[in-house]
Image (cartoon, helix red, strand yellow):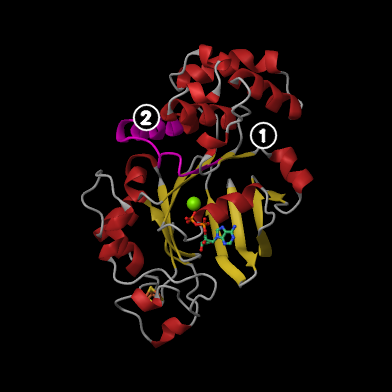
Amino acid sequence: MSLKIENLTVYYQTIAGNVRALEDASFSLADGEIMGVAGESGCGKSTLSNSLVYLHAPMKFIRGRAFLDGEELFIQDKVKMDAVRYKKISVIPQYAMNAMNPTSKIGVMIKDLLTSKGEDFEKILPELKNRLDLVKLSPDVLNLYPFELSGGMKQRMVMVISTLLNPSLLLADEVTSALDVSSQKAVAEMLVGFRDQKIVKSMMVITHDISILYQMANSIMVMYAGQLAEKASTDTIINSPRHPYTKLLIQSLPTVGVRFSESRLAGIPGNPPLLLNPPTGCRFRDRCPVAFAKCAEVPPFVEVEKGHFLACWKEGKTHA
Ligand SMILES: Nc1ncnc2c1ncn2[C@@H]1O[C@H](COP(=O)(O)OP(=O)(O)O)[C@@H](O)[C@H]1O
Ligand code: SF4
Ligand SMILES: [Mg+2]
């Protein structure tokens, strides 16, 4: 088992009150698994990813535990998380492309990063060149400034940097969202290549665009309004989803493989609830076509068939 998360609950403390962005998330990731994390904007995907790298303000830890390769991740401890970052767990944050230091040449930036991690740049340089080759970048990029790279090149550069020290787990947050369709496909293939070449052991690919996941993810976890809704193999989520929200999400997609825009979700009546004051029970209740009285209680996220997890009172009965 690569990653195991138990009851992770994370809020944002604001003057208006707590924004309940992630509530009792429990799931695991197998060795070699590429798991897509899907759901509408604002459902807590980045909160989940960011909290696993280092949970700090404005995020507020409420409860939960995380384990990577059997060892506990002390997600609130900056020193401990700095020690594992890049080496055991690495994130490509949302908007990473724009966060590269504009005043340093890329090679210098990588050298500084490696030095700060106690690694020797010269020793790693041959492997760095291999990795650049893997993502179809020339070693000349090391002498360039970030602004000299196109969006697609920057994204591939960020992917190389974040995986250079072979982290066990890679968290890729909306890495394809700002790219054109052909760059998206290339980035998706490269991420799968990182796993196949054992550069990383497992991966969470976070996206609001579920169609990106069809080709690359082994499994998909669907989130809704800060709660986990369903997790199963990619094939099951696409062809036989059981959670009412997943069903609507899949139905609202045009056809498999066609890029989906967020506006398509207008096909699902209503809007996700505000997480400052979310409804009790199942947060999908107001929009759910099959809601009933029991849904006023929070449905547990349970395994209904092997590898198929679901949080729904109506559809969640096991076949056992
Ligand atoms: N810094 C913040 N302060 C307050 N609320 C936040 C902050 N960042 C995110 N949120 C809220 O937390 C919820 C989850 O956000 P996020 O994890 O970014 O969603 P996603 O990545 O799925 O789009 C949203 O309701 C969002 O408005
Ligand atoms: S628990 Fe109830 S409201 Fe939630 S998805 Fe299932 S049936 Fe719908
Ligand atoms: Mg996000």
Whether residue 270 is visible: yes
Rendered view: 311 above or below 104: below
Q: Position of residue 135 (x, y in %)?
A: 45, 23
Q: Position of residue 212 (x, y in %)?
A: 35, 43
- With 40 as the anchor, is 77 left or right in this view? right
Q: Is residue 172 magenta?
A: yes
Category of crowding for the residue at label 2, using alpha-carbon neighbours closer than 10 angstroms: few (below 14), some (14–19), many (at least 20)? some
**CA gap, disc 2 and disc 1:** 25 Å
Whether residue 240 is visible: no
**Which residue occupies the extreme left position in the image?**
255
Q: Position of residue 45 (x, y in %)?
A: 50, 55
In what element is the residue under mark 2? Answer: helix
| Residue at image location 46% in from the left, 20% down from the top | 134
Which label belongs to residue 307?
none
- With 295 as the anchor, is 270 left or right in this view? left
Q: Which residues are magenta?
A: 170-192
Rendered view: 151 above or below 63: above
Which label belongs to residue 186?
2
| Residue at image location 76% in from the left, 51% down from the top | 77
Q: Place residue 224 in its image quadrant.
A: bottom left
Which label belongs to residue 87?
1
Q: Looking at the image, is mark 2 or mark 1 earlier in the sequence?
A: 1
| Residue at image location 51% in from the left, 59% down from the top | 44
Q: Is residue 167 magenta?
A: no
Q: Quadrant of the C terminus?
A: bottom left
